Image (cartoon, helix red, strand yellow):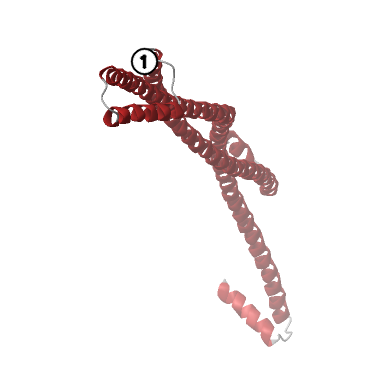
Amino acid sequence: MFAWSKRRSKLEPATEIVELTESIQTLFNKKRDLINEFNTTKNKVEELRNNILAQKRRLNELYLTREKFDKRFNELIELKRKLIVENTELRSKLNKKLSSLKSLSKRASFEEIIALEKKLESIEWKLQTEPKAKGLELKHVDEANRLRRELAQKKKAFEADGEIRNLKKTVEEKSEQIDNINDELDEIRKKLDEIKPEIKQLKDALNNALKEEHIHFDKITSLQNEIEKVQSEINKLLSQKKVVVNKIKEKENHYYQKGLERRKAAVKEELKKKMERGESLSFQELQLLFEEDGDE
């Protein structure tokens, strides 16, 4: 810039003005291009910010959905564990009942038990009402005792059979619950598998967008600095141009004043000659002549 200023100082003022104007215009064009690039980059940043906000919102939605599924998944796992423990205990109890039932006689129906009770009542009635013949009474007593033992065994078998049915039913119900839980767990796994790639894709896209935003921010900062630098050069050249313009004006004013003085001196000389020739002068001519004399 110093060499340029030194070379310019040797130029004629008019030529210097032209060159300064051209340089200023070039810098203005450069500044305009930089501002356009700045605005374009700024718009890109705004667009990126909107995309980043949308991606963050969607990512938060997916995180909440995944958290909800994870919570439900853990609840189901805990419930399944409890059901398995309960079912294991019930199966153990059922097996014991089945083992004990094997040591009993055949399973008895409710009708068989009623029939045995009626038969026992009949024997006991005979023991209470019929004449006591020694052989017959002993036979009835033995029969009654046998019926009581058989009835007790039948009742025990009937009760055990009922408990077994209830246990089997409960085991089946809990097994069905476990199956339903497994189905729901599979469905949750499927939904989590669907969410996982979208989360990864969004995270990658978000990271790339943030990196791009950072690059644009650096570019904006660089453009701002460049615009300020160009503006500083413009201001410097405008200041130089103003100095040159003022010099030209001063020079023009100097030449104008010199020309004006020469013209006035010529008029004054002509008026003096008219006076010497005895010619009359007008009031304005006399005023001009005396003013000129007064100025000198």
Query: On the rendered structure, is 46 left or right of 270?
Result: left
Q: Is residue 233 visible?
A: no
Residue 267, image x, y percentages: 70, 73
Q: Nearer the viewer, residue 287 or 26?
A: 26
Residue 7, by quadrant, is top right
Q: Nearer the viewer, residue 247 or 47?
A: 47
Which amino acid type is shown beneath numbered disc 1?
A: Ser
Q: Nearer the viewer, residue 251 or 282?
A: 251
Q: Nearer the viewer, residue 277 or 184?
A: 184
Residue 212, image x, y percentages: 58, 33
Query: On the rendered structure, is 274 left or right of 98?
Result: right
Q: Residue at x 36, y 15 (%)?
A: 100
- Residue of label 1: 100
Q: Residue at x 55, y 33 (%)?
A: 206
SS under mark 1: helix
Residue 87, image x, y percentages: 41, 23
Q: Residue at x 33, y 18 (%)?
A: 146
* Quarter of the image where the N terminus is located: top right
Residue 292, by quadrant, is bottom right
Please tell me how many numbered marks the rendered image carries: 1
Query: On the rendered structure, is 148 left or right of 78?
Result: left
Q: Residue at x 57, y 48 (%)?
A: 235
* Quarter of the image where the C terminus is located: bottom right
Residue 68, image x, y percentages: 47, 36
Q: Residues within 10 Å of mark 1 (few under 14, many from 20)?
A: few
116 relative to 216, above or below? above
Q: Is residue 254 visible?
A: yes
